[in-house]
Amino acid sequence: MGLAFFGLASAMSSNPQPAPPVPVAQAPAPIFVLNSLDGNVSVIDPVSWTETKRIPTGKEPHHLYLTPDEKSVIVANALSDSLTFIDPRTAEVQRVIPGILDPYHLRFSPDMKWFVTVANRLNHIDIYKWDGQNPTLVKRILSSKTPSHLWIDSKSTTVWTTMQDSNELVAIDLATQTIKWRVKTGPMPADVFGTPDDKFLLVGLTGGDGVEIFDVSGNGPAKKVKHLKTGKGAHAFRAVGDKQHVLVSNRVANNISKIDYKNFTVVDQYPGPSGPDCMDITSDGKTILLASRWAQKLSVIDMTTRQVVRQIKVGKSPHGVWTLDHAPRQ
């Protein structure tokens, strides 16, 4: 009995065992480019660098933002008063929420409780409660002319927004949904970026030649501390991901400046062809994905060589650019 069992065991051990299953590598997430004048989204394969399809959304999609659960990317359709939810990996439309008035720019608070939009056309800021699935309007705040871009502090207490045609920076208290203060800026303020310590805001001046830096560390109104020349038409920001640098696209100068936001100096520059607008950065931190608005192209820029390595044709007036496989936002 014992010998028989030993022989059987030896025979079994000499037979090759099946190899464990090899995990299937997840395909790279697609790149989304919002074609604001076509009312659709170009989906770009980051391996073949080709447009695989276009997703109809609504009129004038300008910006997009990932939901807190990271299961959807929301496209804000300003002229259709709607939000389109898209799967960030499969690029399939999940649902559409109507009745969101003029959502030009959008942002979630870091605590994931608030969802904020600005109405660039209708001159108001909408503050919504977010229950994990749907936004519920809490307060509509009338603003000055042409609210443009948003930033929310890391403690989810304050919203800052620029007023493009009245040249202002406005602060809103989230708890009370009231305006705390407003200060004057240079011409046509657009995007706004906050440093990780919540002490400073950078404001891109699309009607000027650079970035204004405001100290927002105190309890009172922001104080301008510096005007940093970057290039004409400073517009959109994108942090590099190293907790020290941020990019700004200079739409008129057709380039991109790299800013050290610890000492507020320009430390590098990249090409930004044909009206550079919104940007994203690949997860390895080596490549800029840029909407070249006037050329109707996505420009791909190598940050090491500082060269445009390829351009992909997309739709009319490409604006927002985003991919799930991106570098950190600070």
Image (tube, rainbow, N blue to C red):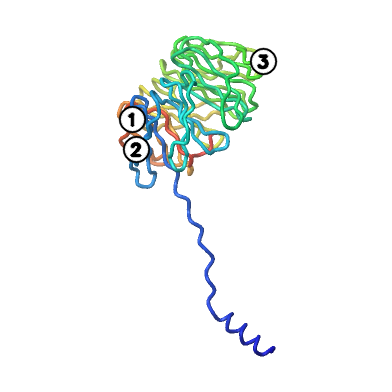
User: Residues under labels 3 and 1: Cα distance?
Assistant: 41 Å
Q: Mark 2 vs mark 1: which is more N-terminal?
A: 1
Mark 1 = which residue? 273
Q: Residue at x 42, y 21 (%)?
A: 80
Mark 3 = which residue? 219
Q: Residue at x 42, y 40 (%)?
A: 287
Image spot of residue 75 (x, y percent) = 45, 29
Please indicate whether residue 220 sits to the left or right of residue 328 in the image: right
159 in relation to 132, above or below:
above
Quadrant in the picture for the C terminus: top right
Residue 247 seen: no
Mark 2 = which residue? 308
Asked if disc 3 and disc 2 are in contact, CB closer than 8 Å, the reply is no
Q: Residue at x 48, y 18 (%)?
A: 101
Image spot of residue 116 (x, y percent) = 55, 22
User: Badge 2: how crowded within 10 Å, few (<14), some, or many (20+)?
Assistant: some
Disc ID at residue 193? none
Occupied quadrant, residue 152: top right
Depth order, front residue of 220/262: 220
Amino acid of disc 3: Asn
Image spot of residue 34 (x, y percent) = 39, 30
Amino acid of disc 1: Pro
Amino acid of disc 2: Val
Dot 1: what SS? loop
Q: Residue furthest right?
A: 2
